[in-house]
Image (tube, rainbow, N blue to C red):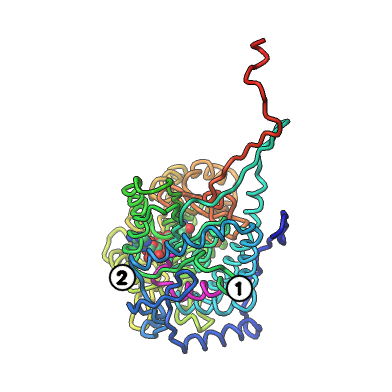
Amino acid sequence: MTDSLAHPLFPQNEPVKTYAPGSPERASLQLRLGAMAQEVPELPLILGGHPVRTGLMGSVAMPHEHRHLLAKAHLGGAQELLQAVDAARKAKPAWSELPWEARAAIFLKAADLLAGPWRDTLNAATMLGQSKTCHQAEIDSACELIDFLRFNVHFYRQLLEQQPQSSAGCWNRLDYRPLEGFVFAVTPFNFTAIAGNLPTAPALCGNTIVWKPASTALYSAHFLMKLLQEAGLPEGVINLVAGPGATIGEAALASPELAGIHFTGSSEVFQGLWQGVSRNLERYRCYPRLVGETGGKDFILAHPSADQEALAVAMVRGAFEYQGQKCSAASRAYIPASLWPLLRERLVPMVESIRMGDVQDFSNFMGAVIDAKAFATQREAIEEARHSTEARILVGGGCDDRQGYFVEPTILEVSRPDYPTMERELFGPILSVFVYPDDAWKETLGLVNSTSPYALTGAIFAQDRQPIEEALKTLRQAAGNIYINDKPTGAVVGQQPFGGARRSGTNDKAGSLLNLLRWVSPRTIKETFAPPKDYRYPFMA
Ligand code: NAD
């Protein structure tokens, strides 16, 4: 027990390792990849700190080598969900009554373990299970997650410092209580960092958690849980329940103890959860906090004054890194007619030079899309374009799922600004380009703003200042994260707080103080030192 307002180390973003040929990190990661690819572990659920084996098995395969079994996962259902809620309830009093520094120390320790001895394991798990290249894994499962863990502690301390004024004779305080009940963290396949952040951010604030990871990311989720346990996370604070989303979701929403949902994934699933909460509203003790970061149809808008070289690189990196499976990935671009012929000449060879394949071969820039369903979505969109008179495949268009779910980086040139791939999230390596007449800049701003229901990220490319200001004004609500002369992906914790509005989510900015605010329920305490002893006021004399 201590009385202190300790200062943890001021957080710095974790440096990104290069994995360049001959580097020690490359040798060490390759060793770990080799070893992990040989094993086929069984992944249990973790309820109340203990492994639970249901015997109902799912298989975890490599997306880029789908016959290679990586692990067998035990799957749970409604009964295991109830066990998880029970474990979260039991763990809550001791966890929430710990001094905040004790909770923070566990997550700071997890960050240091991940920066050191656990780095290779989490990176290798993310590469093998989610088909990320070593660079994409490094910026996600190592650096971003380390940043989330360290910056959240820093922001939580800042939050605790937000205290009201006191007047003479009394002392006013805010007690940042956790929510009453459990937080249901539902995480997507595409970022190990998000899978780590959604349960740990509310846990830092004293909440206990039921965590449902994506079925296509169970492998890294397993190692994440083991890392947290090694860092000293007490039993029952975070309970991992793998299994079918709909079954687990329904059981979680039916619990009167649901206090909040911390979700990242598709807009459809989030809307379903919101509707489920509305249906069950009468059951809950409190109004559950609903935090969801969801889909995107992220744009790149070029002005005739744009720097073409920078624009081409941003389009390629923004659209195709991690196979376009970033919520922030550029998937629609608006290019002025005067720039298009030269830009096209620059883009095509660049895209043709992209190497795609097994992520264990470090010369590849892209791996496979996550599963058969994602592969089918991309193939369908490409086939539609192939047969449409309103689109043409400029480069790419090949799909091959014999060994892994490989979709070539593809650029579609579309003749209608509302062609379906300009509006619909595909979540794959397909970039649709609409070429607009140079004198239609203002109309194009309107198109960008109104074409899609999403508002997550966007990028403006221009060398002239006036169009940048115009775009910032007209597109104020069109993106929660907007970039000027930069690609729309790659937000860094502590530098570009991330999230979008409209159909892209509740914009609660993961990895910031704003997000932590959603996981506390402040209690105001007023204490009067010398209370009045006479009910009559002076004016009554
Ligand atoms: P998804 O919606 O398919 O799944 C997300 C999670 O919800 C998974 O754990 C899944 O099992 C679970 N789930 C599915 N049905 C459920 C139900 N009925 N009840 C409860 N849980 C249920 O998304 P995904 O394919 O894992 O991820 C891709 C999506 O996530 C894309 O739309 C992408 O844009 C979005 N995303 C958004 C952000 C952001 O910050 N805005 C970040 C990453 C991903």
Q: Amino acid at mark 1?
A: Leu
- Give coordinates of residue 458: x percent, y percent: 50, 53
Query: Is disc 1 placed on a helix, strand or loop?
Result: helix
> Which quadrant, please, contains the N terminus?
bottom right
> What stretch of residues is rendered in magenta?
211-227
Q: Nearer the viewer, residue 267 or 337?
A: 267
Report the number of numbered marks: 2
Query: Mark 1 or mark 2, which is nearer the start of the sequence?
Result: 1
Residue 224 lies within the magenta run? yes
Identify the residue at horizontal 44%, vertical 45% (top origin): 440
**How much space separates mark 2 and mark 1, taking CA atoms?**
35 Å
Q: Residues within 10 Å of mark 2 (few under 14, many from 20)?
A: some
Name the residue located 33 percent from the left edge and 49 percent from the top edge. 280
x and y, in percent, of residue 94 in the image: 56, 60
How packed mark 1 is, by other alpha carbons closer than 10 Å (few <14, some 14-19, many 20 or more), is many
* Farthest-out residue, top: 541
Q: Quadrant of residue 99?
A: bottom right
In the displayed structure, 214 sits above or below 207; it is: below
Pick the front one: 282 or 67: 282
Asked whether disc 2 touches disc 1, contact meaning CB atoms under 8 Å apart, the reply is no
Residue that numbered label 2 is attached to: 376
Which residue appears at 54% of the width and 44% of the height? 472
Dot 1 corresponds to which residue? 114
Residue 394 magenta: no
Which of the two residues, 12 or 373, is positioned nearer the viewer here? 12
Principal SS element in the magenta part? helix
Q: Of the residues tagged 2 and 1, which is closer to the observer?
A: 1
Q: Is mark 2 within 8 Å of ligand 1?
A: no
Q: Is residue 316 visible?
A: no
